[in-house]
């Protein structure tokens, strides 16, 4: 399965005998898989099976699922709500004892709200099972359409992510090649700073100053961070070329990119290197924003 984004919309329709229905699936990004389903009363068994079906298609995303059912006119029949009739009669009898008068007749009762209701005609279990199976088959059609839409959008996002990873790699190489990070350049800069301090303060311990300068020079070495960036770039390229959900792992790599970039900027002894690092941080932020929508 190709990499997918987590946004999309799909719809499917179906009909079985006197029943028509439609499924609508709307998906946005989420940390896990959150299925929010709305089905008409009487279709609870369909809901349970539908949830199981959808977990076979999706691993992440907030998905809103709605099922609309329409019955033909001859599939509904009027029936008497006997609970409402009994309640009305009890109230009428109580009122008759207090003020007198006649009890309501059948026609009067039937004209009262809530006494006559419309309901589905009785359906045998075999027919109901066939209807449920047809509805669930239609759900699969909508799920497959949503997968296709998410895959199509995901392919576009992957191309953007690949370009961003390549840009991170280019900026890494620019820092690697920058003459300011050469040990000789660092030593020259630190020596100039130490000499300036000695010239202005003759009472400084010269040997101690050079020891501190040597420690600062070691801290200014960016090689360890640059080496880790190479590893992270390769890992991201492998994930973007793979199949299946990789959003969580890409998000972790984005954090690692950001950590190395921050360290490079804080340790940098060159305005040019710092500037390149800030450009890299901007690309990393854009990379992380994009992968929030990847499954």
Image (cartoon, rainbow, N blue to C red):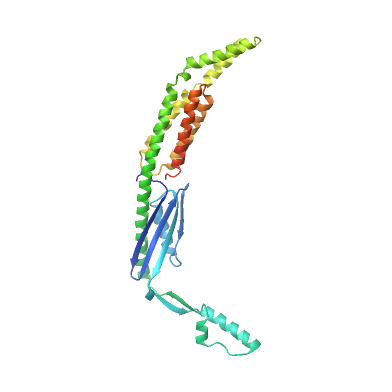
Above or below: residue 138 compared with residue 179 = below
Q: Give the residue at x 48% y 23%.
A: 272
Q: Give the residue at x 44% y 26%.
A: 227
Q: Position of residue 185 (x, y in %)?
A: 49, 16
Quadrant of the snapshot with the C terminus: top left
Above or below: residue 245 compared with residue 191 = below
Q: Quadrant of residue 162?
A: top left
Above or below: residue 6 compared with residue 41 = above
Residue 3 visible within the image: no
Count numbered badges in the picture: 0
Residue 171 visible within the image: yes
Of 206 and 126, nearer the camera is: 206
Relative horizontal placement of residue 111, taking residue 2 as reference (left or right): right
Relative horizontal placement of residue 205, taking residue 214 as reference (left or right): right
- Residue that protrudes farthest toward the bottom in the picture: 101
Q: Quadrant of residue 209?
A: top right
Q: Position of residue 163 (x, y in %)?
A: 38, 35
Of 213 and 124, nearer the camera is: 213
Q: Position of residue 160 (x, y in %)?
A: 39, 39
Of 279 and 176, nearer the camera is: 279
Above or below: residue 19 compared with residue 148 = below
Q: Give the residue at x 38% y 65%.
A: 21
Q: Position of residue 3 (x, y in %)?
A: 37, 44
């Amino acid at each position: 399965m190709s990499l997918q984004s987590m946004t999309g919309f799909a719809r499917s329709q179906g009909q079985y005998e006197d029943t028509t229905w439609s499924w609508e699936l709307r998906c946005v990004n989420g940390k896990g898989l959150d299925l929010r389903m709305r089905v008409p009363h009487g279709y609870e068994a369909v809901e349970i099976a539908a949830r199981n079906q959808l977990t076979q298609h999706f691993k992440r995303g907030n998905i809103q699922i709605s099922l609309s059912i329409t019955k033909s006119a001859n599939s509904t029949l009027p029936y008497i709500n006997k609970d409402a009739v009994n309640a009305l009669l009890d109230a009428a009898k109580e009122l008759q004892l207090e003020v007198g008068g006649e009890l309501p007749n059948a026609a009067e009762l039937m004209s009262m709200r809530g006494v006559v209701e419309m309901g589905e005609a009785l359906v045998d279990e075999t027919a109901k099972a066939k209807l449920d199976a047809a509805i669930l088959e239609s759900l699969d059609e909508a799920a497959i359409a949503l997968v296709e839409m998410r895959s199509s959008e995901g392919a576009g996002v992957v191309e953007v992510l690949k370009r961003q990873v390549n840009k991170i790699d280019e900026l890494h190489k620019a820092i690697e090649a920058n003459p300011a990070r050469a040990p000789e350049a660092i030593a020259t800069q630190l020596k100039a700073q130490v000499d300036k301090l000695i010239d202005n303060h003759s009472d400084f311990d010269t040997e101690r100053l050079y020891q501190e300068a040597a420690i600062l020079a070691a801290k200014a070495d960016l090689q360890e961070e640059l080496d880790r960036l190479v590893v992270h770039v390769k890992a991201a390229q492998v994930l973007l070329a793979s199949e299946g959900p990789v959003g969580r792992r890409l998000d972790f790599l984005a954090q690692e990119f950001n950590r190395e970039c921050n360290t490079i900027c804080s340790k940098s002894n060159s305005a040019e290197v710092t500037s390149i690092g800030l450009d890299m941080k901007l690309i990393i932020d854009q990379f992380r924003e994009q992968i929030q929508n990847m499954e």
